[in-house]
Image (cartoon, helix red, strand yellow):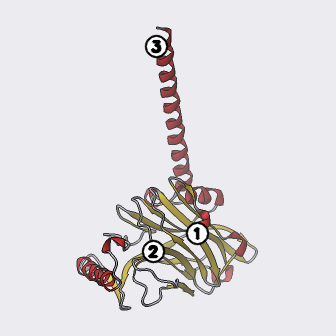
Amino acid sequence: MKNTIKVILGLGLSFMLFLIMNVHTAEASSNKEDALKEKGYTSEDISKMNESTKDQLIENQGRKAEYEVTATEYYNSTDGKKYKVTDQNREKIYKIRDQDLAKYAAENGISIMEITPPVQGISSRMGTDSYSDDKIVFSAFVDKSKTVGSEYEYAAFVDFNWKKMASVAFFDEIALAWDNRFIGLTKTLSGYYISGSGSHGDKLKKDQELYGISARFVLIKSLNLSGGISQNIRVGTNYKGQTGKFQAKYVHTLIPFPGSVSLGPASVDVPAGWSNQEFKLDFNLKIGS
């Protein structure tokens, strides 16, 4: 009888602790959302952010910059052709893609099952900061931090989140490029790469160039796979009111390729011959906002 009472008391205490932990988690999540909304981010913006990005934006003490975003999807074929994917031609382009993958598999004597399955059905979301479907979210955000002397300082973020298990085999790449009026602050470049099993920061190879930042990483077979890169950037206050240009891309590799993207002024360029799906976000940012 005493042992039964002990078991019941133990189960009751465990249940109470479970409820308390869930209440605290819900409160913390609500507090983050409230803080981000005060900075100018919408509920839709926040739903696309990884937890790490939320934390960094809150710590940044700035506000969401004023910008507009255009989202575009491409399929880059094995013969070097670039196809713009729209809702009207999506089925046709995906059929070309599947034929390319089958042909590559046959020519190289490998099973089609060994080739990275392409991401299906990612649709453009005009005027927002991301691509999103039931498998992957790719987002980019720009936060205005402060004015330092004769320069405005911004914090720029690019992140991704695989909501379903990603394919394992090849490297994917994310990048963000800005126009020649902006300068990246070297010591502020950071990145993260995590899964349900822990951190994999050593597998995220970050790089900084004159016109932007990028990161290359191998997809890990894990649920809740997410990562991103960020950097603080500055632009002269003499450009106030002008339109600043940014471009962010997620490149999802379909066939092994040794190269990587190159960055130019507000441009992330993907080499010809790299068979992949390319998800692009073009920003028009009001400088000084």
Neighbour class for label 3 at 10 Å: few (<14), some, many (≥20)?
A: few
Select label 2 or label 3 by which is in front. Answer: 3
Classify 190 as above or below 18.
below
Which one is in front, 105 or 54?
A: 105
Question: Residue at the front extreme?
Answer: 109
For numbered disc 3, what is the local secondary structure?
Answer: helix
Res 89 label: none
Left-right relation of 96 to 76: left
- Image disc number at residue 69: 2
Q: x, y percentage for residue 84?
A: 34, 84
Q: Nearer the viewer, mark 3 or mark 1?
A: 3
Q: Residue at x 42, y 89 (%)?
A: 273
In the rendered image, the vertical position of residue 182 relative to residue 18, given as above or below: below
The residue that disc 1 covers is 204
Identity of the amino acid at label 1?
Leu
Query: Which label's residue is closer to the chain start, 2 or 1?
Result: 2
Residue 126, position in %: x, y? 38, 72
Q: Nearer the viewer, mark 2 or mark 1?
A: 1
Residue at which label 3 appears: 4
Mark 2 vs mark 3: which is more N-terminal? Answer: 3
Instruction: Measuring from the top left, give residue 218's x and y in whole percent.
Output: 51, 70
**Residue 248 seen in the figure:** yes
Mark 2 and mark 3: Cα distance apart in space: 62 Å
Please give left or right for residue 79 compared with residue 32 in the image.
left
Q: What amino acid is at disc 3?
A: Thr
Residue 61 appearing in the image: no
Which residue: 51% across, 15% down? Answer: 6
